Image (cartoon, rainbow, N blue to C red):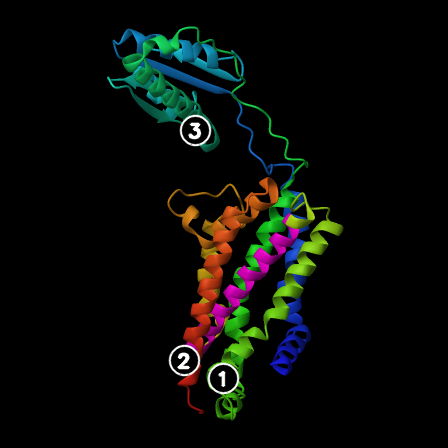
Amino acid sequence: MFNIIFKETKEFVREKIYLFFFILFPVVLVFLLGSLLNSTDVAEEAIGTLKVQYQIDTEDPYTVAAIQSFAASVSDGSNIIFEETDQSETAKKLAGEGKITALVIFTGSPLEILVYEGANRIQNRTVEAILNGFAQSSAIISTVLQQAPQNLTGISTTQETYTKQKDLGVSRSMIDYYAVAMIVMIAFFSIMVGAGTFVAEKQTKTMNRLIIAPKSKASMFVQKVMGMLPQCLLQVTIIMSASVFIFHAHYGASLQVNLYLFLLFIVITFCMISIGSVVGLLINGSPIAVVMPVVWLMMFFGGTYSKELYIEGVSNHMPNYIFQQAAFELAIFGRYDSANKVMLSCLAVTAFALAVGAFIFHRKEAV
């Protein structure tokens, strides 16, 4: 097995096109895209001013008082503005045009909250969070009023700040975004490395030697795929190191987070290589012609090339988008949940791909 690993690593290093496209090219892109787009884009979204109009369509005096008290307390006159209106149709139009953040209608008994959102996703999420807090508090108070109103006696309220600037411990830039996005891009392009390895074996007839070798063909397949693991380590190590030490990109805030990020990228890259190896067994043509269009479209709609490209129901289902979000959550907030799910999924897919590839390779005959 070590001979196969050494052979695959040596061939990868000898291939200048691989060294360029899978190591040098992404490093250059991190700098170019991060630097050129830094003046026109930012890595983190600002909420901005929330201007919300609301309409009360309920006659319950307790509910009306609660809504009015909520609107008065949450509004600060500059960052968050809640204005009552009786022109709901006009307000809907203003929200659609982006002139206000949203229209909120409080209606019915029990209370229902209808929200007509604008186009700004970040502001929509903020309004949703504020209203969720009100809805939960309102439900609790209504229950207490009905069952034990004496428990509300003497309750006092304090003014809270609803939006606060979160200190992430580091000033982020677009270079930080592309330092992650380019590794995910290379991970996906690694499908072509896996596919190209087996297509080349078939074209040069060297696969026959593997097939007729006095060893388990399934084991030979797995060993050959495992032989590409050092390439994953080399790619991720060089890209991350160059991004940090040359272009001053920031990944995680601690060594532990960065090591976990490194492991995440390795697992994703090797998963893509495993999938590509199965594809290489099934096709005879150029992997670039077969795989590249699919990979490129997934990365395009998944926001690898521009984080501003987002199509609800499409982008959020792209694997590269899911991988990027897991990496960003880990790097920026130190959250491991999404990264753990991605790694477990990739390991499961890798095992399945190796099993399928071993089965296909086992049934192959020399030609």
User: Residue 234: x and y, percent?
Assistant: 67, 65
Q: Earlier in the sequence, mark 3 or mark 1?
A: 3
Q: Where residue 269 sits in the image (x, y, percent)?
A: 55, 62
Give SS at disc 2.
helix
Q: Which residue is mark 1?
A: 202
| Mark 2 lies on residue | 360
Residue 300 location (% of width, % of height): 48, 52
Q: Which residues are magenta?
A: 257-284
Earlier-in-chain disc, 2 versus 3: 3
Question: Does residue 131 show up?
Answer: yes
Residue marked by disc 3? 124
The answer to whether 263 is drawn above or below residue 191 in the figure is above
Confirm or deny contact between disc 2 and disc 1 (CB under 8 A): no
Gap in angstroms between the C-alphas marked 2 and 1: 14 Å
Q: Is residue 225 left or right of residue 315?
A: right
Residue that appears at 26% across and 9% down: 60
Compared with 247, 42 (above or below) is: above
